[in-house]
């Protein structure tokens, strides 16, 4: 496993949001994530980690975009388990990139003390800077959200205990301010009766990185035999590695778009701090007049929220004359309902655009 990572000067703030960008198909998500954080007046910067699989020719334009949205870029190397410990069957090929998400636990080497990781397919709906005030029980802990295990679509890959009755969110009602799942603030395998209540969603997590923790993670990734059986690389790893050492925080900070109809009794639109566009991404297809969107046609409302934010971003960049970044974004987002593009096949002539 390659763990090379260049040291950098001290960051402007020891607290930061952080996301990972490994391919151009997630560029719209990453830029809108950064833009939404800025528009919600977060006082903390966003650090965008990029890997060699992201076209180097686009980095100058991304850096220019960062100058408008309180963000910066750090180039890192990809991460994966050694061949002897690599899972043979992931849920989706795109999840191969998510091992690299674990590199955020190296960021203490760059002067960061507390960070909140956010997936690049998220949209911030309200200011959530209060996450940085959250006190963890110890520096080896993280805070995250429970995994929703309802599996109402009956996906064949899901374990047998992924059912509505076994979901940690079952029975919850709207509540403001956001509160953790009742009785599960300390998620400990010895105290929780259901295995599914020990599972987390890795789309958002709060952590305080340090060297000894990182070395333990490297050892676990390289040698623990359980790694070979993971379906969701980073998510399964974090749930296993932090067993008994993670705290539950409000669902509002990692509101899966499917929760809007899988947990109707819990969900409230005005409580959502951070929306997570799992499965298909809103930028891959426009929302029609009939409001149908998403792979099952039930995500029209939440996908439209993304497109509304995109329109605001586009208007802002138009007013600044930022044609190059807009041209690249337009190649990555759907032009019309008939022009929707599959996430895995999005690509364009980046050298030509960046060189204009």
Image (cartoon, grey):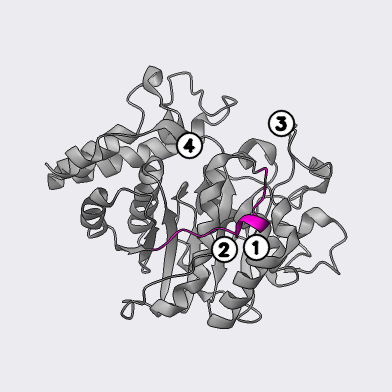
Q: Quadrant of the C terminus?
A: top left
The residue labelled by disc 4 is: 281
| Residue ID at (42%, 31%) | 345
Residue 205, numbered circle: 2
Can residue 340 be seen here?
Answer: yes
Gap between marks 1 and 2, in whole Å?
A: 10 Å
Query: Magenta span covers which residues?
Result: 76-89
| Residue ID at (64%, 41%) | 91
Of 15 and 211, which appears nearest the observer?
A: 211
Gap between marks 4 and 3, in whole Å?
A: 18 Å
Gap between marks 2 and 4, in whole Å?
A: 21 Å
Pointer 4 local density, CA inside 10 Å: few below 14, some 14–19, many at least 20? many
Image spot of residue 63 (x, y percent): 24, 57
Gap between marks 3 and 2, in whole Å?
A: 26 Å
The residue labelled by disc 1 is: 238
Q: Secondary structure at mark 4?
A: loop
| Residue ID at (73%, 34%) | 152
Q: Looking at the image, tell me whether mark 4 or mark 3 is earlier in sequence order.
A: 3
Pointer 1 local density, CA inside 10 Å: few below 14, some 14–19, many at least 20? some
Q: Give left or right: position of 305 versus 349.
A: right
Q: Secondary structure at mark 1?
A: helix
The residue labelled by disc 3 is: 153
Q: Looking at the image, tell me whether mark 3 or mark 1 is earlier in sequence order.
A: 3
Q: Give left or right: position of 143 versus 97.
A: right
Q: Looking at the image, tell me whether mark 2 or mark 4 is earlier in sequence order.
A: 2
């Amino acid at each position: 496993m390659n763990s090379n990572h260049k040291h950098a000067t001290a960051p402007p703030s020891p607290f930061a949001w952080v996301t990972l960008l490994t391919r151009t198909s997630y560029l719209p998500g990453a830029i809108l994530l950064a833009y939404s954080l800025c528009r919600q007046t977060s006082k903390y910067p966003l650090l965008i980690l990029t890997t060699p699989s992201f076209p180097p020719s686009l980095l100058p334009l991304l850096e220019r975009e960062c100058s408008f949205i309180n963000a910066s870029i750090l180039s890192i190397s990809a991460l994966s388990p050694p061949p002897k410990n690599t899972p043979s069957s992931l849920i989706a090929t795109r999840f191969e990139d998510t091992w690299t998400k674990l590199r955020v636990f190296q960021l203490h080497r760059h002067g960061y003390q507390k960070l909140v990781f956010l997936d690049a397919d998220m949209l911030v709906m309200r200011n959530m800077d209060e996450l940085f005030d959250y006190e963890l029980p110890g520096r080896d802990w993280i805070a995250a959200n429970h995994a929703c295990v309802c599996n109402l679509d009956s996906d064949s890959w899901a374990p047998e205990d992924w059912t509505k009755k076994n979901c940690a969110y079952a029975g919850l009602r709207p509540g403001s301010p956001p509160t953790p799942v009742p009785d599960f603030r300390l998620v400990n395998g010895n105290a929780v009766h259901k295995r599914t209540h020990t599972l987390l969603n890795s789309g958002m997590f709060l952590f305080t990185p340090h060297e000894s923790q990182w070395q333990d993670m490297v050892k676990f990734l390289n040698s623990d035999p359980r790694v070979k059986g993971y379906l969701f690389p980073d998510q399964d790893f974090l749930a296993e590695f932090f067993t008994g050492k993670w705290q539950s925080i409000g669902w509002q900070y990692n509101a899966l778009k499917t929760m809007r109809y899988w947990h109707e009794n819990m969900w409230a639109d005005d409580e959502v701090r951070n929306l997570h566009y799992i499965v298909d991404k809103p930028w891959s297809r426009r929302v029609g007049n009939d409001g149908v969107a998403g792979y099952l046609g039930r995500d029209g409302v939440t996908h439209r929220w993304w497109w509304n934010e995109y329109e605001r971003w586009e208007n802002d960049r138009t007013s600044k004359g930022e044609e190059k970044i807009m041209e690249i974004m337009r190649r990555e987002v759907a032009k019309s309902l008939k022009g929707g593009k599959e996430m895995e096949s999005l690509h364009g002539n980046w050298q030509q655009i960046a060189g204009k």
